[in-house]
Image (cartoon, rainbow, N blue to C red):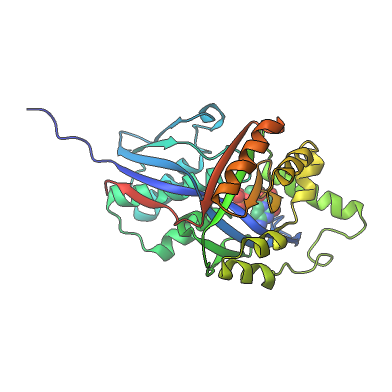
Amino acid sequence: MSAAPQPSVTVRVPAKVNVQLAVGGRRPDSFHDLANVFFAVALGDEVTATPADDLRITVSGPDADQVPLDGSNLAARAARLLAEHHGLRPDVHLHIAKDIPVAGGMAGGSADGAAALVACDALWGTGTSQDVLLELAAELGSDVPFALLGGVALGLGRGEILRPLPVGGTFHWVFAVADGGLSTPAVFRECDRLRDEAGHGSDTASVPDPQADPELLRALADGDPAALAAALANDLQPAALSLRPALAATLRAGADGGAIGTLVSGSGPTCAFLAKDAESAVSVAEALAASGTCRSVRVTHGPVPGAAVTTGG
Ligand code: C5P
């Protein structure tokens, strides 16, 4: 008689783009207060949890070699945190099927952390409430709670205090993936340096409190791509462009190719392009691919839901 198959649980989790990223001053804890409008897109990773003798991470996909396999991996940290919360051992094999660009400003590592929380919770039958999962996610990183929630949400504080936002339709996006990543802390540091250099100062006393833009919230609620395109804003964009000047050519190529809105995604270097409809997204992608200003191009849409079990559990 053959052994019963091991149970396993697979969770799909989306990448994000920040349609507004307003960055306040540097706090004493060196984080920045944000008004961060997260938008989940249908480009995602899959994390599969299988019982194992100890904690093990494997990764597949085009960027697999750039993902750390040690304890610093957010999926590994998530498994340890959830196990500790329930007084268990984190004995699990987590396989990450990676499709989100690594260090690209699309919260790929955070997505894997969120997916690992959901996958391990289902595998171990620990039945953790959504509120506790969100708290554990916030301990892992500023962008992890949103990957649990998905949709569109305003993130305040470090980005971890979330309020879901109404959205009136599907928006069509194109992403231009750059060669190599950008370090998020380095981009925040550059944002501070540029503010200091301009004489404005970079601490909380010098920078106005970040606020969500009412026009942007209305554009999302109305499902109006032209109005959303006009309101797209990322305070980290000058810092990302300062560290990676070549991104200016990528943004121009997407605009010349018919995108109605362009911006750097989060801390970059991935660039995001809003198209007026699905057909236009395909021609923007063709123009970007022909421009030679990026490594690869992805066409997608959103919003989509957050981390959810697809098989097992
Ligand atoms: O929270 P997370 O670990 O994803 O943040 C990574 C880094 O990004 C932080 O160490 C910090 O340098 C920067 N950061 C920030 N303000 C935020 C979020 C992140 O300065 N609100």
Instruction: Give me the residue at 37% from left, 46% from top.
Output: 11
- Relative to 152, is 8 on the left or the right? left
Work out whether residue 207 can be spotted: yes
Instruction: Give me the residue at 56% from left, 47% from top.
Output: 279
Which residue is more in the foreground, 30 or 165? 165
Instruction: Give me the residue at 49% from left, 32% from top.
Output: 69
Image coordinates of residue 225 in percent, x first then y, are 62, 61
Instruction: Give me the residue at 59% from left, 49% from top.
Output: 173
Work out whether residue 104 can be spotted: no
* Rendered image quadrant of residue 250: top right
- Relative to 270, is 90 on the left or the right? left
Is 64 situated above or below 193? above
Which residue is more in the foreground, 80 or 21? 21
Image coordinates of residue 185 in percent, x first then y, are 70, 46
Which residue is more in the foreground, 104 or 93? 104
Is 179 situated above or below 133? above
Image coordinates of residue 199 in percent, x first then y, are 93, 57
